[in-house]
Image: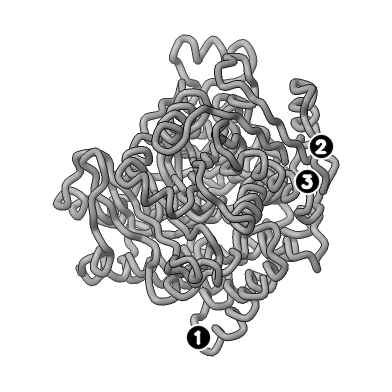
Amino acid sequence: MTNDNSTAASTGIDEIVRRLGAGEKTWAALPLVARRDLLLEVGEAAAAQAAEWVRVAAAVKQLDPSSPLVGEEWISGPYALIGYTQALQDTLRRLARGSDVLAGYRLGTAPGDRLTVRVLPGGLADQLLLNGYRAEVWTTPGTTETRLRAGIGLGQRTPEATDGVALVLGAGNIFSIAPLDVLHQLFAENRTAVLKLNPTTDALAPVFRAIFAPLIERDLVEIVTGGPEVGAALAYHPGITAVHMTGSEATHDAVVWGTGAAGVAAKAAGTPILDKPMTSELGGVAPIIVVPGDWSAADLRFQAEHLATQRLHNSGSNCIAGQIVLLSADWAQKDEFLAALRRALAAAPARPAWYPGSADRVRSARELHPTAEKVGGTPERTLLTGLDLSDPDESAFTAEYFGPVLGVAELPGTGAAFLDAAVAAANDRLHGTLGANIIAHPGTIRALGDRLHRAVATLRYGTIGINAWTGVGYLTPRATWGAFPGHTLDDVRSGIGVVHNALLLDGAERTVVTGPFRPAPRSLLHGELSLSPVPPWFVTNRTAATTGRLLTGFVARPRWRKLPALFASALRG
């Protein structure tokens, strides 16, 4: 193996690319059944490494091992990866047998001549563990069912027609992103892959190598560490045929166009220095649209915790973290809600703003907003109220804070008029198209009727959550994950292409996730058909670590006898 920094930065790069090129021939010769077997081995290895993965991840993020917040690392780490291997292997099994990949999945329609595929719940386990949640993948306008079915399988439709060697530039914030991106390159794009880890995740290199050992041993995957020079040497190597990255728009532009004055000139001239396909997931400024309604005190408290979670999960270092709350200035309960939000932000468990540069970004946000409020919990937690959507220079609408800073902007109106105005603001004023959130009371949803569906269709975002954080879309393996389609290298915004997509659907436009407005048992008492308690990804969940560990164990090896302990832990959250 040539994984140490010194060799990876010099002649070792050539050897890595040569071996993965040879491995491409091995991959091309493997039938779908053998590929599925390898995928199952990866899932089993991830289960075996899960506890060590979480231990190292918690240390990287400076979390107390006994903190409930460790549940974030279980759920956004091994749980996400194992769930994906389970979902993708089912697609491969169906493809190998020549059976209907969409058998058992509900197809429907959405505004704008779109088809929908219900991808959550994906089976009985989802119906039990995520009761009341659902997710649909929406196709691009005009997609017919015939065309949808003809495209299923992507690179696995012709497994012998491989497409070279990919470089994956791994994310440094959520630790399942890089492994999931590698599997996407192998199975959706039909390429072998070298993963260049973000330096924040270097401590996990032994864990990831153990998980991918079945693929590394066959020269299908390689994992390297090192600084930017290693990533650059790989990206521009003639043997690398495609690049995928998760990170910032600035990093994307540096890879594609170069840095400094030369990079600016290359972008202006439309002459990229990267001469190969580039896909990406780059985050953005995510809106949370709060539709006014008649909420109880418990509703105000729960949804305030929901918004706090969308900002404070992983200390705000998420591409999908909600950043701007769009609130009705005419909502009679506006002040009550803002008071509940302040309490929720302050009461969430303390944790360091661990991601590199977070403190500087918070400091910059405060300096640009003299009325910024320090809301407690940690020194960095900040609330920005009174943001002006008509101000073309408001930085909170364009700068992704990637830290514990939440902004609030108000618009006039109620009902459909407010919703339409908020959708327009989200589309036109906020930078990025990765994810948008809508919070609305069930009574308000009924009153809106088709207006809500039309509003969702109008939102230009790759994942949209209705009473569910869009992070649930990330965790749903059969959903798609990525920016709204249409971006280009010179205006990349939240990125190009999608990942995850365990059904290997072609022509997907977005994923729409819906959840319960209230947790059980209040949901049942108010007529919502949902048994889900406070979700384990909420920052306020007291049993998140235990529930996350039990969830991971269940998805790795589903057994009915495991459910009582899992349900008991979830209900105590």
What residue do we see at 66% from left, 33% from top?
Answer: 407
Residue 545 seen: yes
Residue 177 versus residue 131 in the image, above or below: above
Residue 272 percent coordinates (x, y): 47, 20
Q: Which residue is under mark 2?
A: 374
Q: CA distance from mark 1 to mark 2?
A: 46 Å
Quadrant of the drawing holding the N terminus? bottom right
531 and 56: which one is in front? 531
Choose the circle earlier in sequence order: 3 or 2.
3
Residue type for callout 1: Arg
Pointer 3 residue: 354
Q: Secondary structure at mark 2?
A: strand
- Amino acid carrying mark 2 in the image: Lys
Please give the name of the residue rendered at 46% of the width and 44% of the height, measured from the top-left corner: 166
Location of mark 1 (residue):
559
In three-dimensional space, the C-alpha distance between marks 3 and 2, rounded to whole angstroms, equals 18 Å
Q: Position of residue 151 (x, y in %)?
A: 23, 50
